[in-house]
Amino acid sequence: MPVWRPATVASVEATPEWQAWLERSLRRRRTTLEALAETEDVDFRARVEAVSAAIEAEGGAPRDKE
């Protein structure tokens, strides 16, 4: 399994191409980032928070938190 540096992930996620892919993916799954963030799946939430913390530590933009 490839492991990417948080800075690499953050820079790719900032591109218009990745943003367009994310929009299509969410539309196809009929969900939103907000709905995914509100999941009660403890393992999923832990992974999201770990990734967000790593990206922020590398100087990436923090994710919106509600």
Image: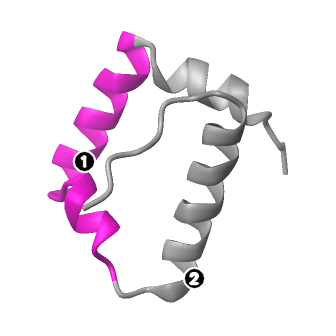
Q: Which residues are magenta?
A: 16-39
> In this picture, is 41 found above or below 51?
below
Q: For the residue carrying disc 1, how many other residues have a C-alpha within 10 Å: few (<14), some (14-19), or many (20+)?
A: few
Q: Specify whether 27 is left or right of 25.
A: left
Q: Residue at x 31, y 65 (%)?
A: 36
Q: Is residue 14 magenta?
A: no
Depth check: 56 or 11 in front?
56
Q: Residue at x 64, y 39 (%)?
A: 55
Q: Residue at x 70, y 47 (%)?
A: 54
**Residue with the mark numbered 2:** 43
Query: How far is mark 1 from mark 2, CA to CA?
Result: 20 Å
Question: Which numbered disc, 1 or 2, marks the residue that appears first in the sequence?
Answer: 1
What amino acid is labelled 1 in the image? Answer: Leu
The x and y percentages for residue 56 are 61, 40
Q: Specify whether 37 is left or right of 48.
A: left
Q: For the residue carrying disc 2, how many other residues have a C-alpha within 10 Å: few (<14), some (14-19), or many (20+)?
A: few
The x and y percentages for residue 41 are 44, 86
Q: Main secondary structure of the magenta part?
A: helix
Query: Which quadrant of the figure contains the C terminus?
Result: bottom left
The x and y percentages for residue 17 are 39, 14
**Residue with the mark numbered 1:** 26
Q: Is residue 32 magenta?
A: yes
